[in-house]
Image: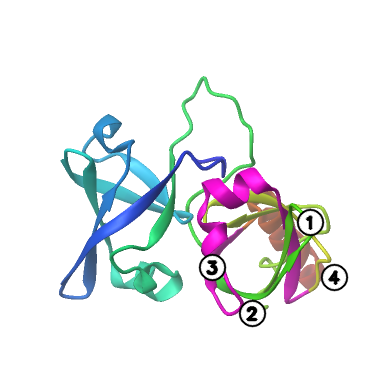
Amino acid sequence: MFTGIIESIGEVVHVAEEGSNKHFEIASHIASELKIDQSVCHNGVCLTVTEITGHTYQVTAIRETLDKTNLNDLVPGSKVNLERCMPANGRFDGHIVQGHVDQTGTCRKVTGQDGSWLFDFTYESTADEYMTVEKGSITINGVSLTCFNSSDTGFTVAIIPYTYEHTNFHQLREGSQVNLEFDILGKYISKIMARQSKQH
């Protein structure tokens, strides 16, 4: 389980294809602290560490993951938001994040706010459980944020300078694809409500 509080920005140094899978070699200052088989969240996607070499490590994404996330767009030089699993005795600073991306969204607009930024995103409303709640939690590329101006197909988030500089939000532009994980509690409630409405 993750919290959406980014620890580090990694940089993709090599991408190798093997069948329908892709192996990503990532450089990060946390690489030397990782262990084989450890789960690490990459832009909101939970992947398993398979190799560690000095300041780089390797993870593999299967075809289903590549099809449902923006990991297929990663190339050498791409910046990746990284978070290790939350320790059992750690503080819960963000919200419950599984590292299981629901779908990708698109950055529609970036607006400067004299020191902060507003990012507008759109997404495909394919199911009742995939929706944002006004002032609710959303995970964008692994970052735990609060959304507002929520609708069935879009929402806005406000980004402070620290988040802008210490995540890959500073690379997002109009048209950028991002990974979205909707609030797990909201998804459970939506599913329960949908079942109850079918029974009546």
> Dividing the picture into quarters, in which one does residue 119 lie?
bottom right
**Residue that numbered label 3 is attached to:** 178
Query: How many numbered badges does the structure rendering display?
Result: 4
Q: Is residue 54 left or right of residue 60?
A: left
Residues packed near mark 2 inside 10 Å, few (<14), some (14 to 19) or many (20 plus): some
> Of the residues under marks 2 and 4, which one precedes in the sequence?
2
Report x, y in % for residue 65: 37, 67
> Of the residues under marks 1 and 3, which one precedes in the sequence?
1
Task: Give the number of the mark in front: 2 or 3.
Answer: 3
Amino acid of disc 2 = Glu
Q: Is residue 137 left or right of residue 9?
A: right
- Whether tag 2 and tag 3 are in contact, CB under 8 A, the answer is no
Residue at 31% x, 69% y is 75
Secondary structure under tag 3 reads: strand
- Whether tag 4 and tag 3 are in contact, CB under 8 A, the answer is no
> Dividing the picture into quarters, in which one does residue 66 lie?
bottom left
Say above or below: 63 vs 24: below
**Residue that numbered label 4 is attached to:** 200
Secondary structure under tag 4 reads: loop
**Residue that numbered label 2 is attached to:** 124
Residue range (magenta): 152-181
